Amino acid sequence: MIRFLVTKIALLIPTFVGVTLLTFAMIRLIPGDPILLLAGERGIDPDRYAELRTQYGFDKPLLIQYGNYIVDVLQGDLGRSIVTKKPVLTEFLTLFPATIELSLCAMIFAVLVGLPVGIIAGVRRGTIWDHSVMGVSLTGYSMPIFWWGLLLIILFSVNLGWTPVSGRISLLYYFDSVTGFMLIDSLLSGQEGAFRSAVSHLILPSIVLGTIPLAVIARMTRSSMLEVLNEDYVRTARAKGLPPVRVIGLHALRNALIPVVTVIGLQVGVLLAGAILTETIFSWPGIGKWLIESVHRRDYPALQGGILLVAIVVMLVNLSVDLLYGLINPRIRHRR
Amino acid sequence: MATEVNTPEFRAVPASAPAGPWREFWSSFAENKGAVAGLATIVIVALVAIFADLIAPYSPIAQFRDSFLVPPFWAEGGSTRFLLGTDDVGRDLLSRLIYGARYSLLIGCIVVTLSLAAGILLGLVAGFFRGITEDLIMRAMDIMLALPALLLAIVIVAILGPSLTNAIMAVAIVVLPHYVRLTRAAVISEITKEYVTASRVSGAGLLRLMFSTVLPNCMAPLIVQATLGFSTAILDAAALGFLGLGAQPPTPEWGSMLAKAREFIQSAWWVVTFPGLAILITVLAFNLAGDGLRDALDPKLKR
């Protein structure tokens, strides 16, 4: 296990170096002088320009610039946003809980609906249940989620008035952020109705963001279930007269879940990409919306730092999924 | 293809000639009703795109100053002059959707061609040359996969600047790793087989081995991935368009038609609904056809 762990972590290093190369190159590939960009539209006098060039190290050879960049990154210094002048890391950490909260709720929704639906489709193979589950999940998989979000807003927010259109909580409530997670903070604040409001703001975005993972999980559960139901041990369990619920729930499901767990882990990248669109539609103050705004505002330091941090998050999550999988399945662990 | 399985079934018509590979493929593809429906939809969308000039009632950028935000003909206030209504500057939605089909299919074609060609080349090189070349290529692909696809596409567009061409480039680069990995895996499993050794021993050169001996036997998974790649390409390019990073107005690309749609969720549902529906139908059609292709081309997955 230790060796498995060490190999997995060692494999991350080249990827990390690669991603930093990408973000380092990005700021230099973007057309326009980065210092003129910093100076804004007013322009800058030549002396100050030279001074800034030295200050930011743009006069040094590229290799040394990259070395300095890596040292800064490892110390947690990702530069400052051009627009807010705040450190990029601070901005990221303030906004990240909102994205985690949304992604977690989306994932819970996807698993809670996707798993049972996939099991039903697998067990009742070839029936109308199976066909409708497969049809709906393929539709979900093909969904342009930015449009799906707008449709749900038209239906539930505009026409029925059930849920709010945007934001994380109603403007009626104000309290200081303790954890950054609105659901917890609203409970801690003790204000009546605050938690309700936070939940109602979460429902639509979670459904929208969870749609594609839900479709993937349902399809994966079904095919994994079909495979397991053909195994000898399931036949044995049936033959010795166990009730079907026990056969499916205990014998089949446990083994069918292994690939499903991996697929769930792999959805994290999908969630973060989807968060960009979902947060834009629902004005959800998270990482995705911030990144897109950085692109539009040409706030390249923020974009550069944000991209690197998102990549690190995805890498760490993938690592944990790998380790978890190695823990469940010894065959993976011992394979070189 | 050498994947034909001889099942010990008794033949109903023993004397007839065996079905050709195309016939066999088609009969197996046609069994899947969803796949046929998907294919039919693709054909219709393609015809609409080709004959857009003939079908569309108006130009996609013609503005009718007297008709802003006219609802579709069946809704109150709508007229048959604009079947699906007009947008906020008085352009006929139906015409824009019809011309939009061109953009979506074009995006799909270019992205799939570019990424498939580059992916096959890199995958073949990685599979044939192993060692450090393979490591370099596969590590690079891992790095690209470390970022969520849409995010990487956004980075590329931020570097190149927002436009339809750059969005297509970005999406093509982002989906590249899938083709490289597939090709390499297929090459590695094929390369040890006897027919490759035989060809090598009888003096086939490297290029001949790569492209005419091994590659044709790796095509099945690539064809499936390419079909499904159409849907990814259309979806991602539409997402970029929606974010204002893809096709720029007044291009009638379906995704960018939705970029301003949020303003109309209260007032004009048709401006929001139809472009997205067009994307969904097209993407779904490619996914259905792709699934059908996979079942037809991969006998192992057959029922």
Image (tube, coloured by chain):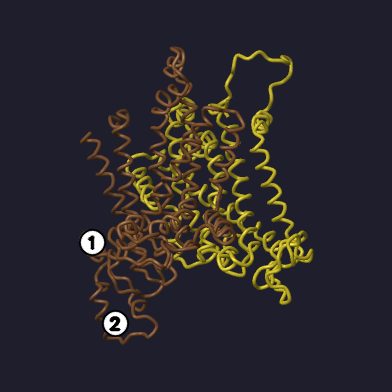
Q: Is residue A22 visible?
A: no
Residue hosting label 1: A76
Please state the chain letter of the residue tagged with numbered disc 2 in the rendered image.
Answer: A
Q: Position of residue B285 (x, y in %)?
A: 63, 45
- On screen, residue B290 versus residue A30, left or right, reads right
Which amino acid, by three-letter code, is at mark 2? Tyr
Tell me the colour chain B is drawn in: yellow
Residue hosting label 2: A49
Q: Position of residue A149 (x, y in %)?
A: 53, 56
Tell me the colour chain A is drawn in: brown
Seen at 61% across and 60% down, the residue is B254
Seen at 58% across and 25% down, the residue is B303
Cα distance, mark 2 to mark 1? 26 Å
Please state the chain letter of the residue tagged with numbered disc 1 in the rendered image.
Answer: A
Q: Position of residue B256 (x, y in %)?
A: 57, 64
- On screen, residue A35 versus residue B89, left or right, reads left
Q: Is residue B79 above or below residue A127?
A: below
Q: Position of residue A271 (x, y in %)?
A: 42, 51
**Total number of numbered labels?**
2
- On screen, residue A274 versus residue A4, left or right, reads right
- On screen, residue B58 versus residue A37, left or right, reads right
Q: Is residue B128 above or below residue A225?
A: below
Q: Earlier in the sequence, mark 2 or mark 1?
A: 2
Which amino acid, by three-letter code, is at mark 1? Gly
Seen at 52% across and 29% down, the residue is A122
Mark 1: few, some, or many residues within 10 Å (few <14, many ≥20)?
Answer: few
Q: Is residue B104 visible?
A: yes
**Image mark for residue A183:** none
Looking at the rendering, in which quadrant would you find the N terminus of chain B? top right
